Amino acid sequence: MWMLRSTMAAFECLGSPSEAGRVSSTTETTAEKWKRHIIRQLKLRDRSQKIMFQDVILSYVKLLERSHQKALIAQGILGSVARHPLQPCKDSFSSVISQDANAVRVLRKTSGDLAYQVVELQQAIRIKDSVLDEQHARMCEVKRRLGAVEAEFLSLQARVEEVREGNCTLKREYDSLLERHHVMDQTYRVEKVRGSELLEDMIQSKRLAAANMNSKNEKRVRAREASLQKELETATKKELDIDVGFGSGVPTKPASPKSRSPENSERFHRRLFRSASATSPRILDSIKELFEKKRRGNTVSSLEEDIYAPVGICVAARVPAKALHFLDAHELGINAVRFSSSSNLLATGGTDRVIKLWDVTAGMLYNRGSLDGSNEGITSIEFDPTGTKILAASYDKSALYWSLDDCAPKFTLTGHSRKVTAAKFKCSLRQVVTGSADRTVKVWDLQRAACIQTIDVLSYCSDVVCSEYFIISGHYDRKIRFWDSRAASCTQEVPLQGKVTSLDICPDHRQLLSCSRDESLQVVDLRMSNSRRTYRADGFKCGCDSTKAIFSPDGNYLAAGSADGAVYIWNVNSGNLETCLPGMHSSSVNALSWSASGQYVVSVDKSRRAVLWSDF
């Protein structure tokens, strides 16, 4: 009903027809449109709200109808009483009273039912109100969540746009880098071709120079031979009357040619030739010089000498006790160090691609010069027994050979496909052995500077030692392998507990020392390969995959550097740690060398420091 009232109020607000007639036709049309729009909206609201309160309205209408009936009944009773106020008829009064009593009973019953229905309807209204409140709260929560989701959606959209812009930027950068890569790759290919051409030109020029020098040497030899031949012919044509009497020491007068017998004449001619040879030392010197030059002049890259210089024997090595001298020997880390056989010359090599030479005098290291020629870092150094030649392995997949009187290498041994980790002289000095990370060991002929044998060693080779016919190699697969170089076959394998980082052989060639990444040193008796001894110490740790361990020159001690910068020395016979020398290195010790005299030990580390140790 309140809906109807609101509708009527709206009609009243719209105005009466008489008032509408006073407005102009345009205004009337607009008002009519507004009225129709308002009526439609009211009807729509009435329908939407009437659905929720339809039961209440129907119950209310029924109550109104019943109350109206009760009112009519009451009016009828009162009317009948009013019409007969003084009627003495007792029957009429009783009948009216009975009718009224019945009506009252009916009214009471109807009103009780209606009150009960009203209570029920009120309870249903409260329930629906609570449901509506709950739905309204849920709707508010849903709206709030919808707002949060919309805000998150907007932020995600903004993030997507940022990611798209970033992807576009990265795509542009990638395209530019790809273009630069193509340009640089093309430049690299051009430079590589150019480098190969330059290398070919250099090799060709070297060949021409070698051929020219060989031809000159041959011409000198032929000229010298012709001159010597002339001198010999001249000497044989001379006749010298020299006859020495034996016993009295007084020269006797030779007999005249006419009085000589044929036998005496033949003896006389033999004596003449012997006397001429004995009295012409210049001719003998010329002949000797000729053959020496001829032997040395055959090839440009041949060895000048193939003899061993006398090497002193160390009776007892000194165990170092203190540092005599230390210095930063290189610009970068040092990987290798080696004493010459004379014990007064030291060589160090590192990642700065240079080998430096040091004179060891009065417990000090004095720079003597450097040897250049390597394109990358040096991994190992080896002196020949004469102390005048140096062989070094390099990261540039080659080994280099120097003579100390020239800072440039005499020749370079190339052929490995990865870095060369070790290079050692064989006993004859005409051959060297190299080990590489490409899982091969190569044997080289120094006369021709060429590889004469390649052995596939099955694993990364970290170090090698060799004799005339046997090669021993250490590997990253935790094995030491023995090879017969004549047949290129493996004769024996010795398993270890860790990667092999270095090998060294005792001066008497009876024991083999290995250092491995299981923080231990092992000595293998080469006469009985199953006989092995392990050397460990508290604090000793192998610092890298190329840590070197060495024998002392008398074979009684072992020395190795640790990752903590200390130098550890063990007694071979007792197996005990002899001494530990800490404090001089701030980084891992890579390599050591013990002088042939047994007096000095030099250690080098990753931080370019070299330390000279001794016991005085």
Image (spheres, helix red, strand yellow):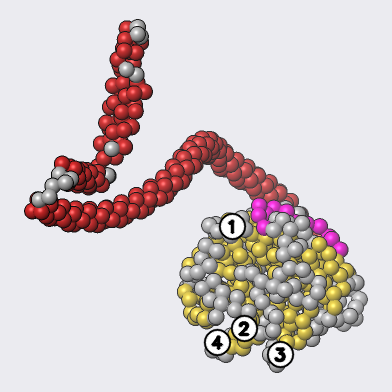
Q: What residue appears at the point 69 percent right and 58 percent down from the top-left corner? A: 351
The Cα atoms of the two marked residues, 2 and 3, are separated by: 13 Å
Q: Tell me which segment is drawn in magenta.
A: 366-377
Measured Cα–Cα span from mark 2 to mark 1: 29 Å
| Residue 220, x across and y down, in percent | 71, 49
* Labels 2, 3: front one: 3
The foreground one among 500 and 264 is: 500
Who's the residue at 31% across and 30% down the image? 7
The residue pinned by badge 2 equals: 522
- The residue indicated by pointer 3 is 576
Q: Secondary structure at mark 1?
A: loop
The residue that appears at 65% across and 86% down in the rendered structure is: 535
Residue type at mark 2? Gln
Q: Quadrant of the C terminus?
A: bottom right
Residue 397 is marked as 1
Q: Earlier in the sequence, mark 4 or mark 3?
A: 4
When the figure is inspected, residue 162 is found, relative to residue 137, above or below; the finding is above
Query: Dot 2: what SS?
Result: strand
User: Of callouts 4 and 2, which one flags the residue occurring earlier in the amino acid sequence?
Assistant: 2
- Sort mark 2 into few (<14), some (14-19) or many (20+) by Cα contacts within 10 Å: some
Q: Is residue 57 magenta?
A: no
* Res. 556 image quadrant: bottom right
Q: Earlier in the sequence, mark 2 or mark 1?
A: 1
Residue that label 4 marks? 529
Horizontal side, residue 300 vs residue 356: left or right = left
Q: Secondary structure at mark 3?
A: loop
Distance in Å between CA atoms under marks 4 and 3: 22 Å
The amino acid at mark 3 is Asn
